[in-house]
Amino acid sequence: EVVEMMLADQGFFFPLVTTVFLITIVALFKRFWVGVAPMVGVLVATIWTMGVLLSSGATLNILSILTPTLVLVIGVADGIHLVSRYREELAHHDGDRAVAMGVTVRRMALACFLTTFTTGAGFASLVVAQTKVIRDFGLQVACGVTLTFFAVMVVVPTLLAWIPVARIG
């Protein structure tokens, strides 16, 4: 019953958090499509995470039901960093999209990986917990955070490459 109530809460709060993030990012960058790119990357990551977890036989418990929201909250930062750096590189390279994107990914991949790795390692460290619910939660979120890095590093640059330079800002 508690898990069902938490699922209902997730059905309400996940879209709410997504909308608040989207509005905040669009306001931050003052460009709609530039704000959408990090959110799409994180939403793809959330879908991948839930697909991998559920197809591997994982069951959602009272803690792991929070995995989609955690993936969203943790992953959106990498997307924002990529967008910010891409905008800076566009300015430094006179609007040359290919060069700006190449420099952005080269310079941000390691930094994003390290933040993601340490976050994933922190959650993975819960594997030593004696409670199965906590162990499962830690492993599921660690898996989700890892998938988020790959989704954001693939999806966000791809989406940014489709946005005309004039709309990047």
Image: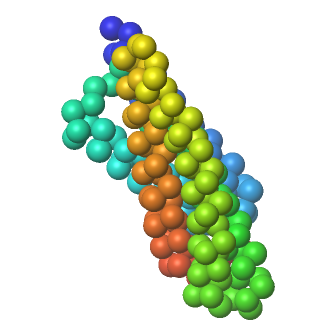
Apparent side of residue 29 relative to residue 39 in the rendered image (left or right): right
The tally of labels here is 0
Tell me, yes or no, if residue 97 can be seen here. Answer: no
**Residue 60, horizontal then vertical, whole percent:** 33, 25
**Residue found at the very far front of the displayed protein:** 128
| Render colour scheme | rainbow
- The foreground one among 56 and 46 is 56
- From the image, which quarter does the C terminus lie in? bottom right
Residue 1 visible in the current orientation: yes
Residue at image location 42% in from the left, 51% down from the top = 147
Q: Is residue 116 above or below residue 98?
A: above
Horizontal and vertical percent position of residue 62: 41, 17
Residue 104 quadrant: bottom right
Query: What percent of the width, then of the height, locates residue 144?
Result: 43, 43
**Residue drawn at (70%, 70%) of the image:** 85
The x, y position of residue 41, in whole percent, is 48, 58
Task: Judge whether 167 appears above or below 20 on screen.
Answer: below
Quadrant position of residue 118: top right
Does residue 20 appear left or right of residue 124 in this picture?
right
Task: Name the outermost residue toward the top.
Answer: 1
Query: Measured along the vertical axis of the image, is residue 44 above or below residue 141?
Result: below
| Quarter placement of the N terminus | top left
Residue depicted at x 51% and y 31%: 125
Position of 55 with respect to 71 (left or right) is: left
Task: Look at 46% across and 49% down and name the residue there.
Answer: 146
